[in-house]
Image (spheres, rainbow, N blue to C red):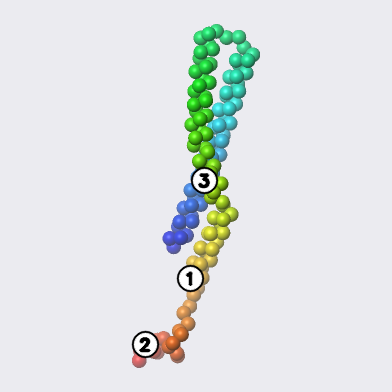
Amino acid sequence: MIIAQNAINEIFIISEKAQNECERLIGELSHNDRETVDILHFLEFEEFSLETGYSVLLKLKSLRLARRKIKDELEPLQTLITMLDMQKLDKIRQRIDSKVSKQEDRKYTPRVIQGGLVEAINI
């Protein structure tokens, strides 16, 4: 296979991995946000001891730190996915495949030597 075909195929694979990872991170972020809301509602509606309040505070801090880590991964990944326009990549792949196909079917027509190359070389 030609280098350009390998390269575009690798770009497609990387793009798919990035999209899958982005979806996974969005799911994690959503889960984290729902868990945070559950804790906030607990704080709003429940009576609790100082010790429980401190435990809840530590849990909230842990969730917020995890959320920040997810967002720090997600933001550059979303930029990558936005910049890797799949329609443009597909056009590139089609053009490369077309060039390779034309190369496989091409024939040479002599410009100077007349009557066939084999006969001219055997002279």
Task: Report the residue at 58% width, 54% height from top.
Answer: 87
Residue 43 in picture, x, y percent from top left: 60, 15
Query: Relative to 103, is 112 above or below?
Result: below
Assess disc 3: are there few (<14), some (14-19) or many (≥20) residues with their C-alpha within 10 Å of its C-alpha: some
Considering only order in the chain, which callout, 2 or 1, is on the residue closer to the N terminus?
A: 1
Q: Which amino acid does label 3 sit on?
A: Leu
Labels 3 & 1 near each other (Cβ < 8 A): no
Considering only order in the chain, which callout, 3 or 2, is on the residue closer to the N terminus?
A: 3
State how far apart marks 2 and 3 are (Cα): 56 Å
Q: Which amino acid does label 1 sit on?
A: Gln
Residue 24 in picture, x, y percent from top left: 54, 37
Query: Relative to 86, is 101 above or below?
Result: below
The N terminus, quarter of image: bottom left
Residue topped by disc 3: 80
Labels 2 & 3 near each other (Cβ < 8 A): no
The C terminus, quarter of image: bottom left
Label drawn at residue 121 = 2
Query: Relative to 113, is 8 above or below?
Result: above
